[in-house]
């Protein structure tokens, strides 16, 4: 829940697509914001200062990261 709206610009995916935003150019028109949030969350977990999973074995970290990414991407309301 903490990561699902990281760095949200306050606009919808549809608006970003129509306005030709830099985020849409980077992530594509489908699930733009969700892909952005997921990438930022991954970046936080890549940084030793913010990796809350650092005490877990690598395989468990990978499992949790994959699950977190799937959960963040699933918040795209266009998919529901």
Image: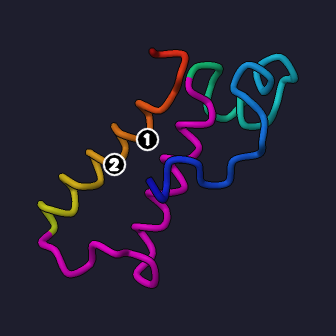
Q: Which mark is residue 72?
A: 1
Does 80 sit above or below residue 69?
above
Q: Residue at x 53, y 37 (%)?
A: 35
Does 22 sit above or below residue 67?
above
In this rendering, position of residue 48 left or right of residue 76: left
- Residue 51 lies in magenta, yes or no? yes
Element marked by disc 2? helix
Would you say the residues marked 2 and 1 are in contact, meaning their CB atoms lie under 8 Å apart?
yes
Point out residue 54 in the picture as x, y percentages from the top left corner.
Answer: 27, 78
Point out residue 55 in the picture as x, y percentages from the top left corner.
Answer: 20, 81
Q: Which mark is residue 49?
A: none
Q: How is the image coloured?
A: rainbow
Q: Residue at x 84, y 24 (%)?
A: 20
Q: Toward which corner of the image does residue 49 lie, by quadrant? A: bottom left
Q: Residue at x 49, y 55 (%)?
A: 3
Q: Which mark is residue 68?
A: 2
Does 2 sit above or below residue 77?
below
Point out residue 48 in the picture as x, y percentages from the top left corner.
Answer: 40, 81
- Residue 60 lies in magenta, yes or no? no
Q: Which residues are magenta?
A: 31-57
Instruction: State the separation of the CA atoms marked 2 and 1.
Output: 6 Å
Mark 1 crowdedness (10 Å alpha carbons): few <14, some 14-19, many ≥20: many
Point out residue 17 in the picture as x, y percentages from the top left corner.
Answer: 76, 20
In this rendering, position of residue 28 left or right of residue 69: right
Q: Nearer the viewer, residue 48 or 7?
A: 7
Give the number of callouts: 2
- What quarter of the picture does the C terminus occupy? top left
């Amino acid at each position: 829940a903490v990561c699902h709206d990281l760095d949200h610009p306050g606009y919808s995916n549809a608006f970003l697509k129509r306005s030709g935003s830099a985020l849409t150019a980077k992530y594509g028109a489908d699930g733009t914001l969700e892909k952005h949030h997921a990438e930022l969350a991954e970046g936080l977990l890549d940084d030793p200062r913010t990796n809350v999973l650092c005490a877990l074995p690598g395989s468990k970290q990978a499992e949790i990261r994959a699950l977190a990414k799937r959960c963040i991407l699933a918040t795209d309301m266009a998919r529901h």
